[in-house]
Image (cartoon, rainbow, N blue to C red):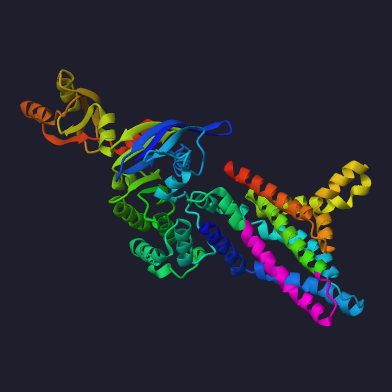
Amino acid sequence: MHQTWTLTKRELRAYFDGPAAYVVLCVFLAITGWFFSNALFLQNVASLRSVFSIAPFIFLFFVPALTMSSFAEERRAGTLELLLTLPVRDWQVILGKLLSVALLLMMAISLTFVYAITLAILGDLDLGGTVGGYLGLFLLGVTYGAIGIWASSLTRNQIVAFILGFAIIFLLFLLDKITDFVPGQIGIIMQYLGADYHFQNLMRGVIDTRDILYYLSVTGFAFLLTTYTLAKRPE
Amino acid sequence: MIEVQNLSKSYGSVEAVKSISFEVSQGEVVGFLGPNGAGKSTTMKIMTGYLPPKEGTVLVDGIDIREDALPVREKIGYLPESTPLYSDMVTYDYLEFVAAMRGVASSDRASRIRAMTNSCGLHEVLSKRIDALSKGFKQRVGLAQAMIHNPPILILDEPTSGLDPNQIVEIRELIRKIGEERTVVLSTHILSEVQASCDRVIIIDNGVLVADGTPEELQAGLSGEEQISMTVLDGEEDVAEVLGSWDLAEVTEHGVDEHGESYFMLSSPQDIRSDLFRLAVDHNWTLTGLQRKTKNLEDVFRQLTGG
């Protein structure tokens, strides 16, 4: 298992050796900060709701951008062959990569704790909604990450990996917003499958196992698909 | 040590490897020879456990690679074709990463990296990023990562391709040094390389194993007939007449060369140079050249792979 951690460290280091991690962290902080202070100072709303409503949009673009290289670049450079002939299981490799994305997202998210602390000092922090929102945001990010990694395992071209990952994530994001166009029963199913729907639930401060289970199962499914794709060892 | 049994592999409808079988024993240095696209790399990818075989299997110390891949992978050091490395990493960090992934205990890593630095001559590039290294140094880093866990088996796919002649000699010497204590399987399409560094040659063509033996065995096995060339100062016709009725050898070709000497190519089941000399003395010929032609590995290769 320590090999998985070794790989996670390498991946994280690759993010921080280049500009990728800094760009992601800074831009994420800048955008959420603008929405937070906008609500606080201009609209006199002391709430993290504005941060939580913009963050999924940012993740929509940022997460596939972070994951697009994970397997596609290894395939292009041929390093995948070395990686997958090391004495580790394929799933350990995938887990190592997913963990590195999860940790980077956790860093980005934890930077916004500043806003929560500000609100707590000012005296009006909805604790349930805050905890739920942060949990939801993290789970959402990890789910997107698992999907992005799968997309990256399908191709050796990073741009294709990004667009593919973005398209799948966007579809998942959109599902619960287009239920008006379909008959009721299907609408309920689509709503349940929508990634944002469960985030909205958690953001309200209702920490329901169904929502958590949703993210875990989508993550698990994407993970499984990646294992399957890698097992075929396509050239 | 390594048993490859009836290995087959196809990409789509293209059969890359067709039922190849061979064995490699401990301490052997085996050269994998074949034209480009013959199935060398595919066979090696299966041996290292990267690609699953379509049929057949590979046993390493009796362990089936399809059933128990990890213990097999632990015994193998692998350098894939064109030496893929993480170009954004510093050499030292990269070697440390591979050592950790290979399960080298953290207390041993520094000493293993030091040992690899010495044997592969990496002193001056340890703190450089891999993408800043020359091709020769990248190749050495590739060899170092393959040996970092001190594996009993090394599989090297074209370890000298793309190097300049000096680097080729260096890498070849390194491989010979490595081969003294390890089992090495290396692929190449450079024939002199096989002659320089291998105990045994396996030739593959179109996914089929066409030859397996020591370089000497392959050369001898193919020759069959001895080829002897002779030049004399005497008239071509007269000598040809005598040789035509001689029963020890057959004249395959004769003529007059650019120096005005008559040359004759003879073929015979055995070495007949001494008989030929006596024949020349008997007929008072002025013998200026007498040579036995041995087939070299290049002839063997061309004959077997239809080049």
Q: Position of residue B227 (x, y in %)?
A: 23, 30
B29 over A46 or under it: above or below: above
Is residue B76 rendered to the left or right of residue A225? Answer: left
The image quadrant that residue B277 belongs to is top left
Q: Position of residue B77 (x, y in %)?
A: 41, 51
- Foreground pick, A224 / B131: A224
Q: Position of residue A11 (x, y in %)?
A: 58, 62
Counting the numbered discs, the total is 0
B66 over A2 or under it: above or below: above
Is A81 inside the magenta-drawn segment? no
Q: Is residue A223 visible?
A: yes
Q: Which residue of the protein is positioned furthest toward the bottom in this rendering?
A: A121
What secondary structure is the stretch in magenta mostly built from?
A: helix
Segment colored magenta: A98-127
Residue at 84% over, 52% down = A174
B104 over A33 or under it: above or below: above
Residue at 29% over, 47% down = B196
Q: Which residue of the protein is positioned furthest toward the left in this rendering?
A: B282
Is residue B151 rendered to the left or right of residue A56? Answer: left
Residue at 11% over, 33% down = B286
Q: Is residue B34 visible?
A: no
Is A103 inside the magenta-drawn segment? yes
- Foreground pick, A125 / B95: A125
Is residue A60 rendered to the left or right of residue A21? Answer: right
Is residue A111 rendered to the left or right of residue B191? Answer: right
Q: Position of residue B56 (x, y in %)?
A: 46, 32
- Foreground pick, B290 / B210: B210
